[in-house]
């Protein structure tokens, strides 16, 4: 009944043709056209059969069907159904619907349920919009911090706990880090690594995956990350290796990756230029071995030892004239340095001398004490000096050096603006506080600190005229020191002596075959002598021979020198 009433209220069947206006696109218009054609065909067939239905001639069928019982059942069923349909058609369904007063509770309940569903949908829409806004406003993964918004956001907290840091080998287009397939792949890879590189003779995983074990076992298997993370930790905090954390903050891992890719960006560009220009079959990054898998550990161990030796030699050079720890003064050893020093305050400061055996003057500007320079500022000053004197850093070395100074300068965020000394602490106290007593050089630094204090206790102030008169002799002795320093560098240091001999042999071979001049002209080799560039192969060969002959004498003289402060301790 309700269906017939609804049909009387709703539009006629033929009015649905007007929906063709909402069909968009050629495909939809064509489908609608075919649908209307089928509707016309059906309407034509129905109209052809619109005559009154014929009645059944039961007498004719009684003569054709021999089973009279079956015929009688069919006849009774037809009569019953026809009477039932006639009674239904005779009823007034519209008035019956209007007289129906009960049973609307189901409709009201359905309406209330629909209203609640709409409200729930609106709430879901609001939450989705809010989630999208929060996701857009969230910082990138490289700036995650456990001490800020991450504590309140459980989703991202779980994400960070599962993904400590991103791997550049993940094929994000086809791999899902959240999938079971990726977990199975990682598990199989870890089991393979464990069986291959465990080093303890074990042949199975022993219940746990590597990421489920303590970090010291991870670092025991992977020594490379240990060295990388330890260097970053010591540079970032200035702390002790014994306080190395179990797990570093996530932001530190992200910073390590950013610095690594920054350095590799420089190395890769240089490798590409060399590879494309030489058209060689294979090429390798600077400061990397040819076989990283087998020779990487030994190569980087030698590289770290070389940098350590270079740092010790540099500190020793500064200690020779008591420049080390004299951070409140400007050391002056050349006429150019003298001129730059008096330019800081217009010559209003004072020059100091520590004795005739110290080939350096110290200038203290008038006014406030000198501020501790920033590491990046020192790097840029050193790089500019090297460039202005006709030399240059290796591109990869310069990038790594700059990244190191940036990490070093980031200490200022947690130390109140200081990166080396605590408030009110001198550089001497800060340095001695960080040197371990078990260090082999601790007694040397301790003796130097006492001698440095003694020397400055007897420092003598000089007038401007006296300081200018002393500068020629000081600069002459400084140049001699520079020459002898090269002899010591390539004569005493094991890290530089072997490399120096190898390069010397290469230069000798190039000179013998006559290719040395071409290497100098192309800029492949740059030679500097006395602050000027050496451009002739003959002059360079003579300088190398003179250096080799005087190196052994300088080494013997240095080894014969004794430190009175250390002799007293013995």
Image: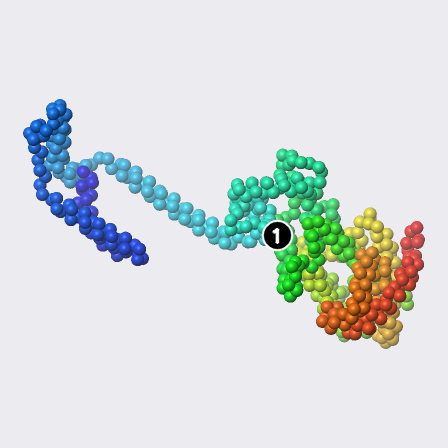
Label 1 packing within 10 angstroms: few (<14), some (14-19), many (20+): some
Residue nearest the viewer, comparing 243 with 542: 542
Whether residue 115 sits left or right of residue 411 in the image: it is left
The residue nearer to you, when weighing 372 against 70, is 70
- The single residue placed furthest to the front in the displayed view is 513
Q: Position of residue 413 (x, y in %)?
A: 66, 56
Label 1 sits on residue = 254
Residue 45 rendering spot, x and y as whole percentages = 16, 46
Q: What residue do we see at 37% from left, 45% from top?
A: 119
In the picture, the quarter occupied by the N terminus is top left
Q: Looking at the image, which is closer to me, 161 or 527?
A: 527
- Report the number of discs: 1
Residue lying at 72% horizontally and 46% vertically, measured from the top left: 243
**Hey, which quadrant is residue 449 in on the image?**
bottom right
Determine the image quadrant of residue 359. bottom right
Image quadrant where residue 72 sits: top left
Q: Is residue 412 visible?
A: no
Residue pictured at 59% horizontal, 40% vertical? 187
Q: Position of residue 174 (x, y in %)?
A: 51, 49
SS of the residue under disc 1: helix
Q: How is the image coloured?
A: rainbow
In this rendering, would 14 be left or right of 208?
Answer: left
Q: Is residue 436 above or below residue 385?
A: above
Looking at this view, name the residue that lies furthest to the top: 69
Q: Residue 125 at what x, y percent from top left?
A: 41, 48
Residue at 76% across, 65% down: 369
Answer left or right for 346 relative to 42.
right
Q: Is residue 551 visible?
A: yes
Relative to 346, residue 424 above or below: above
């Amino acid at each position: 009944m309700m269906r017939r009433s609804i049909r009387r209220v709703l539009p006629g069947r033929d009015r649905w043709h007007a929906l063709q206006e909402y069909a968009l696109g050629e495909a939809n218009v064509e489908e609608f056209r075919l649908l209307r054609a089928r509707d016309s065909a059906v309407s034509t067939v129905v109209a052809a059969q619109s005559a009154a239905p014929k009645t059944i001639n039961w007498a004719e069928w009684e003569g054709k069907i021999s089973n009279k019982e079956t015929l009688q059942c069919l006849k009774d069923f037809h009569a019953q159904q026809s009477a039932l349909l006639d009674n239904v058609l005779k009823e007034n369904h519209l008035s019956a619907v209007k007289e129906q007063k009960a049973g609307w509770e189901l409709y009201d309940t359905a309406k209330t349920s629909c209203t609640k569903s709409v409200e729930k949908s609106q709430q879901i829409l609001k939450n989705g919009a809010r989630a999208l806004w929060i996701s857009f406003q969230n910082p990138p993964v490289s700036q995650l911090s456990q001490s800020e918004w991450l504590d309140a956001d459980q989703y991202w907290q779980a994400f960070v706990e599962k993904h400590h840091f991103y791997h550049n080998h993940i094929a994000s287009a086809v791999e899902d880090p959240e999938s079971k397939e990726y977990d199975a792949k990682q598990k199989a890879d870890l089991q393979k690594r464990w069986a291959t590189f465990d080093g303890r003779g074990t042949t199975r995983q022993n219940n746990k995956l590597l990421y489920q074990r303590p970090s010291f076992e991870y670092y025991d298997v992977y020594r490379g990350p240990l060295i990388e993370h330890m260097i970053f930790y010591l540079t970032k905090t200035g702390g002790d290796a014994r306080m190395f954390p179990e797990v570093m903050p996530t932001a530190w891992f992200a910073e390590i990756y950013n610095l690594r890719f920054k350095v590799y960006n420089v190395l890769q560009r240089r490798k590409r230029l060399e590879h494309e220009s030489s058209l060689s079959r294979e090429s390798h990054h600077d400061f990397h071995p040819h076989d990283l898998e087998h020779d990487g550990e030994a190569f980087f161990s030698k590289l770290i030892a070389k940098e350590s030796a270079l740092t010790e030699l540099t500190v020793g050079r500064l200690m020779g004239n008591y420049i080390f720890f004299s951070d409140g003064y400007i050391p002056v050893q050349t006429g150019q340095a003298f001129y730059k020093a008096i330019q800081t305050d217009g010559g209003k400061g004072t020059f100091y001398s520590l004795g005739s055996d110290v080939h350096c003057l110290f200038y203290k500007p008038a006014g406030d004490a000198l501020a501790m320079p920033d590491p990046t500022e020192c790097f840029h000053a050193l790089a500019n000096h090297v460039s202005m004197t006709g030399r240059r850093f290796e591109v990869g070395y310069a990038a790594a050096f700059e990244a190191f100074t940036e990490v070093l300068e980031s200490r200022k965020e947690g130390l109140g603006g200081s990166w080396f000394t605590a408030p009110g602490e001198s550089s001497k106290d800060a340095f001695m506080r960080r040197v371990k007593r078990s260090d082999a050089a601790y007694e040397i630094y301790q003796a130097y600190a006492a001698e440095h204090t003694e020397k400055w206790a007897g420092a003598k102030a000089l007038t401007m005229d006296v300081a200018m008169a002393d500068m020629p002799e000081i600069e002459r002795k400084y140049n001699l020191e520079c020459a002898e320093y090269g002899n010591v560098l390539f004569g005493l240091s094991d890290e530089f002596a072997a490399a120096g001999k190898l390069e010397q042999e290469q230069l000798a071979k190039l000179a013998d075959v006559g290719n040395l001049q071409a290497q100098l002209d192309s800029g492949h080799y740059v030679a500097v002598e006395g602050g000027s560039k050496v451009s002739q192969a003959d002059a360079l060969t003579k300088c190398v021979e003179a250096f080799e002959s005087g190196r052994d004498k300088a080494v013997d003289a240095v080894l014969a020198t004794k430190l009175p402060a250390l002799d007293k301790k013995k």
